[in-house]
Amino acid sequence: MSHEAYCEDFFTTADKNTINFVEQITLWKKRNLMLYPNDVLNMLIDCNMITMVEVEQILEMTNKKQVDITLPTRYIAE
């Protein structure tokens, strides 16, 4: 069995909210706008991927953690 056939058999589309979120980030990128953490959190809330209560809980929980400054894996070329 080839790799392509295997991927086709088990491929599932992304959640609609995830697609909306990626669309919004792509639009910001096309317009060369800077995204700040609060912008991303607000986008997540707008796309119904997280609630305001969850964001507040996460922010409170992370106040005591150290920042991980390692860059994410690069999947998309510039």
Image (spheres, rainbow, N blue to C red):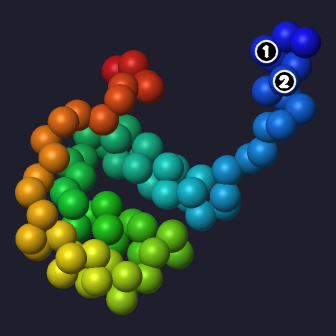
31 sits left or right of 45 in the view: left
Quarter the N terminus occupies: top right
Mark 2 nearby-residue class (10 Å; few <14, some 14–19, many ≥20) = few
Residue at 42% over, 67% down:
44
Within the image, what quadrant is residue 10 found in? Answer: top right
The residue that mark 2 highlights is: 6
Residue at 28% over, 75% down:
58
| Residue that lies at the very extreme toward the top in this rendered image | 2
Mark 1 nearby-residue class (10 Å; few <14, some 14–19, many ≥20) = few
Instruction: Give, as a three-letter code, the residue at label 2.
Output: Tyr
Within the image, what quadrant is residue 55 found in? Answer: bottom left
Q: In what element is the residue under mark 1?
A: helix
Instruction: Give, as a three-letter code, the residue at label 1.
Output: His
Q: Nearer the viewer, residue 18 or 67?
A: 67
Q: Nearer the viewer, residue 7 or 32?
A: 7
52 above or below 24?
Answer: below
Q: Nearer the viewer, residue 10 or 28?
A: 10
Q: CA distance from mark 1 to mark 2?
A: 5 Å
Residue at 34% over, 41% down:
29
Give residue 20's position: percent from left, percent from top: 56, 58
Give residue 35's position: percent from left, percent from top: 24, 52
The residue that mark 1 highlights is: 3
72 sits left or right of 15 in the view: left
Give residue 56's position: percent from left, percent from top: 27, 84
Q: In what element is the residue under mark 2?
A: helix
Are the residues tagged 1 and 2 within 8 Å (C-beta)?
yes
